[in-house]
Image (cartoon, helix red, strand yellow):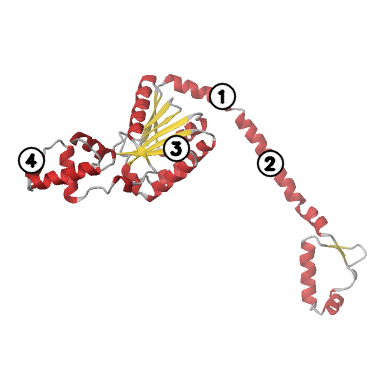
Amino acid sequence: MTHPTDLASQLAARAGLTVEDVSAAEERLAQLGLLQQSPGGGWVAISPESAADALLAPFEQDVLERRIAMAATRERLHSLSGDYLEARSLRFARSSVEVVRGLDNIRAVIDDLARTCVASLDALAPGGGQSEAAIGAATPLDLELLGRGIRIRSLFQHSARRHRPTVHYAELITAAGARVRSAGVLPSRMQIYDRGCAVLPLDPHDTAAGAALVRDPSVLGFLCQLFDQCWDEGVEFTEREAEQGPEPTGLEREVLMLLAAGRTNDEIAERLGLAQRSISRLVAQLMDRLDATNRFQAGVRAAARGWLS
């Protein structure tokens, strides 16, 4: 700045640098807009603020134009919301049961139901631990619903308590406000949105094959009642299994299965080839662990804990 008309060789001599170093530095500074050629010869130094304005102005203009285009596109799409909701209501009105096939279509329907949900989501998730794909798809949707104040109740089978990814998922949504329970046996995978639409798999063994969306009031009323009954029989997912005692294995499990099947002590002893006194002792121990006052209650409580599955 103090010798703007000096040649590169003169600047090099002043700074103790080579001519090549000075020329390279001048080129880099010129590219950044920090040096400009002077009409009288030599260079003129430009402030970094002015250089930034000149260098970034085209990019800022491009960003502004893109934002304007995005806002216009968003506005055009939002203007179609009324038409979409009207067409959606007509589709629902024509059929109380709608079949959706293909995993991508099912996910699109689930996304739509979650986006338009206003009050509640009740879900049955049988089969023990859930797949990582299912957990990955459900987590952001559930957290978004909970963030909007939607009530979520999720019911798993007891065996899911031993599946670490499912446990982590349950802990995550519970911390966000969901209620999570587990039960011994669940009838089918099911999601009920706003008590007004239930999603059931067409094939319980292949949920990607297709889904049925049920809105028929009588069928939907039965499904809601079924969920409520399963929910009432469940226990909070956060309760530790240790509080229920260890799950029976080996001979204890065989005795418990026969006990739950309604066999007498004599029948169990004959079936297993053991003394009746030994069977009576094992049955008494099992009933004590189940805190059951009779054999029927023992079977019910064993089923509720998932010991018979």
**Residue 222 versus residue 200 in the image, above or below:** above
Marks 4 and 3, Cα distance to the nearest angstrom? 54 Å
For marks 2 and 3, the one nearer the N-term is 2
Q: Which residue is mark 1?
A: 83
Which mark lies nearer to you, 3 or 1? 3
For marks 4 and 1, the one nearer the N-term is 1
Q: For the residues labelled 4 and 1, say whether their Cβ atoms are less than 8 Å apart.
A: no
Name the side, left or right, on which 192 lies relative to 27: left
Disc 3 residue crowd, few under 14, some 14–19, many 20+, Cα 10 Å: some
Q: Residue furthest right?
A: 40
What element does badge 1 sit on? Answer: helix
Q: For the residues labelled 2 and 4, say whether their Cβ atoms are less than 8 Å apart.
A: no
At 80% from the left and 77% from the top, the residue drawn is: 19
Which residue type does callout 2 highlight? Arg
Q: Nearer the viewer, residue 225 or 188?
A: 225
Name the side, left or right, on which 64 lies relative to 4: left
Q: Which residue is mark 3?
A: 107
Q: Which residue is mark 4?
A: 266
What element does badge 4 sit on? Answer: helix
What element does badge 2 sit on? Answer: helix
Q: Which residue is mark 2?
A: 67
For marks 2 and 4, the one nearer the N-term is 2
